[in-house]
Amino acid sequence: MTNIANPANTIDIIKKYDFNFQKKFGQNFLIDTHVLDKICQASGLGKNDLAIEIGPGIGTLTEALCERAGFVVAIEIDDKLIPILEETLSSKDNFKLIHGDALKVDYLSLLAEHKEFSSIKIVANLPYYITTPILMDLLEKRLPLKSITVMVQKEVALRMKAAPGTKDYGALTLAVQYYSDPAIVQEVPPHCFIPRPNVSSAVIHLSLHEKTPVSVQNPALLFKTIKFSFMQRRKTLVNALSSGFHIEKKDLQAMLGSLSYPENVRGETLSLADFALIADGIEELQKKS
Ligand code: SAM
């Protein structure tokens, strides 16, 4: 079987196996070969790369990844899709299927099994109900990944790429930009999938930083600072951080003043570099108390 993405082929496979789409698994299969090519191009996959795919479905993207990558590991949660994948990808000798939950996979052991590949790329049409947990899990583990090229909800892609002061800017933006450089590759309308999702989608490419763009004494404290600043968006930074960290407002005001921030500054206008300075300031305040 080749070219699963062709809508007639997808429908044939679904009928042959009497497959029922499961909403709870975020199953919207891609049926647009142009979008498929765009994902593959953006990933820059080559024979020296190990590709990891989360949620292969019936093998639509997997088939294309096997053509380009040195080896492909795909992780699928749905029991019903396992026999289908075993057939649709039976001719591929550079492919391994893991039946399980992508949030529970031991990625370090998986990479150790394929250590002949120094370049590892994640490529996927992600299930939308767990897009953020999957991406944050992969980024926070600091796995030696080159890039992540994924289909996500358009709204999530815009949040990852947002600039300070815009409505989409928030904790997700800063977390993604701490670990990577995001670029939106293409917007994808609902009719490119079967069944059609209720939202528009977008392909986003995250090129992982070898070195983080800011250095802080305590990265966990940086993320806590960001979290508290955006938890109550309408509060000033002083108020948000004071209730989050239980630090006196006057101490926070003095620290922010020493860094030349105005008293009424809000988190939504601050860059990642600003948050790094402020997190180090909080670290000092906590050491003193
Ligand atoms: N890659 C296929 C395509 O492009 O047509 C299917 C993409 S579909 C949006 C998402 C896939 O992720 C489904 O096959 C679904 O069963 C699978 N999935 C959902 N939750 C998962 C999880 N926690 N771990 C692994 N796969 C999951």
Image (cartoon, rainbow, N blue to C red):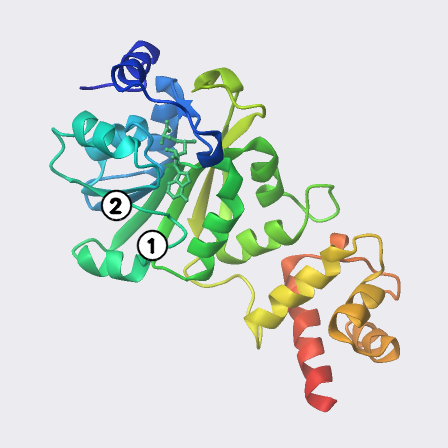
Q: Give the mark, 2 or 1, whose residue is nearer the N terminus.
A: 2
Q: Which amino acid does label 1 sit on?
A: Val
Image location of residue 270, percent across then percent down: 72, 57
Question: In terms of image quadrants, where is residue 113?
Answer: bottom left
Crowding near the residue tagged with mark 2, few <14, some 14–19, many ≥20 C-alpha atoms within 10 Å: some
State how many labels appear: 2
Q: What residue type is labelled 2?
A: Ile
Image location of residue 147, percent across then percent down: 38, 47
Q: Is residue 223 above or below residue 152?
A: below
Q: In which quarter of the image is ligand 1?
A: top left
Residue 105 is marked as: 1
For this orientation, the residue located farthest to the top is 8
Tag 1's secondary structure? loop
Frontmost residue, 191 versus 202: 191
Residue at 38%, 22% (x, y): give it: 20
Asked if ligand 1 lies within 8 A of label 2, the reply is no
Frontmost residue, 173 versus 124: 124
Identify the residue position indicated by label 2 in the image: 98
Residue at 30%, 26% (x, y): give it: 60
Q: In this view, does 159 lie above or below 26?
A: below
Image location of residue 56, percent across then percent down: 32, 34
Cα separation, mark 2 vs mark 1, equals 9 Å
Question: In terms of image quadrants, where is residue 46?
Answer: top left
Image location of residue 4, percent across then percent down: 27, 20
Tag 2's secondary structure? strand
In what quadrant of the picture does the C terminus appear?
bottom right
Q: Say whether marks 2 and 1 touch (CB < 8 Å).
A: yes
Looking at the image, residue 27 sits to the left or right of residue 14; the answer is: right
Asked if ligand 1 lies within 8 A of label 1, the reply is no
Frontmost residue, 236 versus 260: 236
Residue at 83%, 60% (x, y): give it: 265
